[in-house]
Image: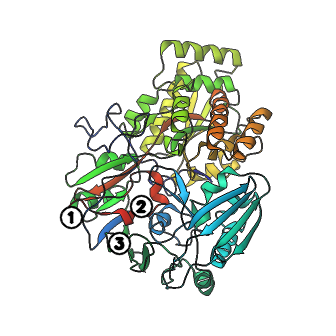
Amino acid sequence: MTHASSRTKALAAGLVTAVTLTATGCSGATRDTTDGSGTADAATLALTPVTTPAKGALAGVDWLLEDEPDSLDLDTQGTSAGRVVLTNVCERLYQLQPDMSTKPFLAEKAETPDDKTLVLTLRAGVTFHDGTPMTADDVLWSLQRHADPDMEQGDEFANIAAMRKTGDRRITITFKTPDAMFFKALAGDAGIVWNKEQVEKAGEDFGTPGQPDACTGPYRLSDWKSGNSITIERYDDYWGRKPLTKQVTFRWAADSALVNALTTGAADGAYAESPNTAAALKNKKGVEQHYGPSTASLVLIPTERGGLKDPGVRRALSLALDREGIAASGYGGMVQPWGTPVGSGAWGYAKPVFEAAQKAVAHAPASPTAEDLSTARELVKRSGADPAEPIVIGTDSSQGRSVVANAVRAALQRIGLKGQIKTVPAAQFEQFYSAPQERADIDVLVGDWYISKADPMGFYDNALSDSSNNWVGFKDDAYDAKVKKALATLDDAERAKLTVDIQKTFTDAAVWISVAQVPSVLVLNKDMTGPPASMAYLYYPWAAELGAKKG
C-alpha cells in the first residue's frame, strides 16, 4: 500500500521525523551532529538501520506515542500508533528486517514452484498468547480476513486467484498473474496471523480495551486503560528469543509535551513524530537520537485543476526549487534534498542500482544554478503558460509545509510565473488527499508520502493512467506496460532494472515533484539501546531488542 502522510498517520508514524542521510545509507549511528544551534548539518549526518545491541535487562520502559490508538485491530484501523504497539505483539508470515530486506518468518519456508504459485510451510511450535498452537487453519482464516474488501489490506489481495490449506503446516496461494509485491505485503499487515477462535469470540469488540490480542509475538497485551496507557509484557512461552525488557508502557503526548517528557526522564523513548520535535531534542542531556532509512518523502503533487498540467512547467518548477533552503528553514536541516518520490528505505534490495539512479535524476537540483533557472524559464516560455494566472499552492499552517509553500511561490516567481498560497486548517488539508472536490481550488499540494513496502515499485503504480493518485492525468501507455511488467517480475535484479527505467520516465515528466527524503528518528534514553532506527519499527518487534547498554 502507498500512503499519504499526515500529522496523525504517516507523520505520526515517525517517517518524516528523520535527518538527512548519506547516499549509501550504510554508515554508523549518528548523534548530536548539530552546529550548536540545534540545526543539523546535512553534510555530516549519516544513517544506520540498527543501534548497538543491548546487554542488560530492564524491568520496565515508558514509551511515547503521538496518539492513543483507535483500535488494536489493524484490519479495521490501520493507524501508526496501533502498529507501533502491535508490532511487538503480533507476528507476520514474512518479516521486514531493520535493513529493510524481508524474509519468511511465521512461514519458515516459502517456495515458488512456478511464477503464479506460492507455497508457505508454517513454523512449528508457535503458540498464541492463550497457549493454543498456531495452525494452518488460523493462517488461512487470517489471510481471508485480510482479503475482505472492507478491510485495510483488502487491496493487497486483488491479484489472488485462490488460497488453500494444502497440509497440516502448508498454505498454497495462487495468483492470477505473477505478483512481486505480495511477498512484501506479507511482511506488512497483510501477513499478520490471528487466533481465529479469539477474534471470532470477541466479535465487533476485538481490538478494544479489555479484549485479548490474539497473537503470537514476544509480548502480549497486558492492559489498556482507555485515555491513559497501554501496557505490554513479555510472553514467557514465546517460541523465539526472549526480550530483555519485561514490560513496556505506552502513553501519548504531542509536540512540546513529548519533548518535555523525554528530556525530564518521564519517558524513555519514542520514534519522533515530526522534524521539529526531533530538532527540539537535539543536544538535550540524557537522550540520544539514532537515524535510520525510511521510504518517506516530501513531495509536490499536482492536481486536476490544471495549473501544472504541462510537464514542461512541472520540470521548470522542479529546476527552480531551492531544496536546500527548504531543508534548512523548514526542517532544521533534518531532511535531505531528493529527486525521487521514495526515500532510500525503499531500497530493500539492489541498493547500488537504486543509489546510482537516484544520483542521475535530472531536474531536481539541491539548489538551482543560473543555468537551471535559464533552462526553466525557457521551458515556461515554450509551454505558453499565462504568467498572470496564479498557480495555487495548497498547504496547512505547519512550519515545514509553510516553508515549502513559500519556496514554491518563490520558485515560480523566479521563472516568470505567479504563485498563490491557500492555507487551510489541518483537518481540511487531510481531505485534499482523498476528496477531489476538496482540492478543486488548488493546483499543487504540499504533501508527504510513504510506502509500506521496501521496494520502489510499491510506489510507481501511482502514475498509472487509471490510478486514483494520478491527479494530474499523466498518461503514457509505455509507462503503464512497464509498471505492470515490473510488478509481475519476481527476479529482484531484473525488477530493479525495470524500476530504474520507470523511475526515469516518472521523474523526467515530473509527475510529482520530489523535494526531500525524510528518514526515521529513534529518540532514546542514553543508557538504553537495541531497537532498530529504520522504518522497520512499524513492522518489526523493536521492543524485543530494547535493553540497557550495560549488562
Q: Secondary structure at mark 1?
A: loop
Q: CA distance from mark 2 to mark 1?
A: 31 Å
- Rendered image: mark on residue 66: 2
Q: Mark 2 touching mark 3, by CB under 8 A?
A: no
Residue tagged 3: 249
**Is 182 situated left or right of 242 in this image?**
right
Between marks 2 and 3, how big is the CA–CA gap? 14 Å
- Amino acid type for the residue under numbered disc 3: Thr
Question: Disc 1 designates what residue?
Answer: 551
Residue 368: percent from left, percent from top? 48, 20
In x, y percent, where is residue 337? 46, 32
For the point 22% across and 37% down, which residue is it?
Answer: 36
Give residue 217's position: percent from left, percent from top.
Answer: 47, 72
Which of marks 1 and 2 precedes in the sequence? 2
Extreme residue toward the front, this view: 113
Q: Quadrant of residue 341?
A: top right
Tell me which amino acid carries mark 2.
Glu
Taking the image as drawn, is residue 412 in sight? no
Rendered image coloring scheme: rainbow
Q: Position of residue 499 (x, y in %)?
A: 64, 37
Task: Characterize the local packing of mark 2: few (<14), some (14-19) or many (20 or more) Cα atoms within 10 angstroms.
Answer: many
> For the residue carrying disc 1, how many other residues have a C-alpha within 10 Å: few (<14), some (14-19), or many (20+)?
few
